Image (cartoon, grey):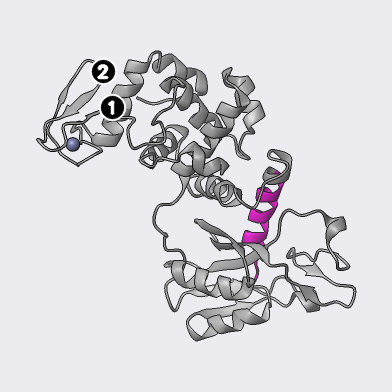
Amino acid sequence: MKFKSLLHLLEYFKDDQICIEYYEQIRWGGEPACPHCGSLKPYKTNRGYKCSDKECHKKFTVKVGTIFENSKIPFRVWFAAIWLATEHKKGISSVQLAIDLGITQKSAWFVLHRIREMLREKAPQMLGENEATEIDATYVGGKEKNKHFPKRRSRDHNLITNEGKVYTPKKAILGIIERNGKVALKYVDGETTRNMVDFVKTHVPADSTIYSDEAAAYKQLKKTYKHDNVKHSLSIYVEGQVHTNTIENFWSVLKRGLYGVYHQVSDKHISRYLDEYAARFNNRSLTSNERFNQFLEGSESVLPYKILTQ
Ligand SMILES: [Zn+2]
């Protein structure tokens, strides 16, 4: 089944039963597994399945153990929400989603956070195995007027004091991006540069080529990587292959989205928004339909409301 639009998707998923069958195929590939004990021998009941394992014997549906667990929102509304949240390049706010789908804003907020959980990379992916990567840190949030230092943003989004020194706030978003491929993002609260070195080591294999700006701590990377940096302090932004334009373009899309669509993103939830942006970017070459299926495969994860709100 190929969906080319939201309308098409809703026409196909006309009732809950069709959604359930579709999702069972994605999740189990025709072989239902008990989410409680893993047994592959459940039998069908009127409302779902019952495990035949003597010690387990629990009832379940395909929603148990997924982002759809314990939700009263119909499956087709969930599917429409996934489509909207992942097809809109900058995302969709809970206010807008509530209007589009006729659900409360509170429900829409929860649905969107669970979708972000679905989009989260469950294992760190390796970047830069076949091409150069660019790394950079950027800063979001906080009111400019509350910052206790003279502020001016350089082209690479660092903050420059009136004395011309680079000021590095503690809370930062770290990014690693392949020039023609994928991105990895991480929100950190602490020493940006040391966090960056650890982050790079998690995602980039040794001996790869990395470009950055001239933050002093990145010098550590030279031990493990082919590292070169641009000299922004000398107003040199591109020297042959040595530039960080790819990650800077990514930051501007991210910030337009975070500020334009979501307005204010709290420290508590920012990592989830980063998961959302990274997932959309990293799957941009797929068709809408392929993306939808690909994302659904990440849905085996429950995110309780309590965790989001405590
Ligand atoms: Zn079981």
Identify the main secondary structure in magenta: helix
Kindly indicate the quadrant of the structure image that contains residue 57: top left
Query: Whole-Å distance between the Cαs marked 2 and 1?
Result: 7 Å
In this rendering, is residue 7 above or below 144?
above
Give the residue at x 17% y 22%. 44
Residue 80 position, x and y percent, is 49, 24
| 56 and 287: which is toward the camera | 56
Residue 303 position, x and y percent, is 45, 41
The C terminus is located in which quarter? top right
Given the image, on which type of amino acid does mark 2 rest? Arg
Give the residue at x 44% y 79%. 207
| 91 and 266: which is toward the camera | 266
Label for residue 47? 2
Mark 2 lies on a secondary structure that is: loop
Given the image, on which type of amino acid does mark 1 rest? Thr
Residue stretch in magenta = 241-256
User: Which residue has dot 1 on it?
Assistant: 61
Name of the residue lying farthest toward the bottom: 223
**Left or right: 258 as drawn, with respect to 196:** right
Q: Is residue 1 magenta?
A: no
State yes or no: discs 2 and 1 in contact (Cβ < 8 Å): yes
Label for residue 22? none
In this rendering, is residue 283 above or below 76?
below
Mark 1 lies on a secondary structure that is: loop
| 202 and 289: which is toward the camera | 202
**Left or right: 107 as drawn, with respect to 299:** right
Looking at the image, can residue 4 be seen?
no
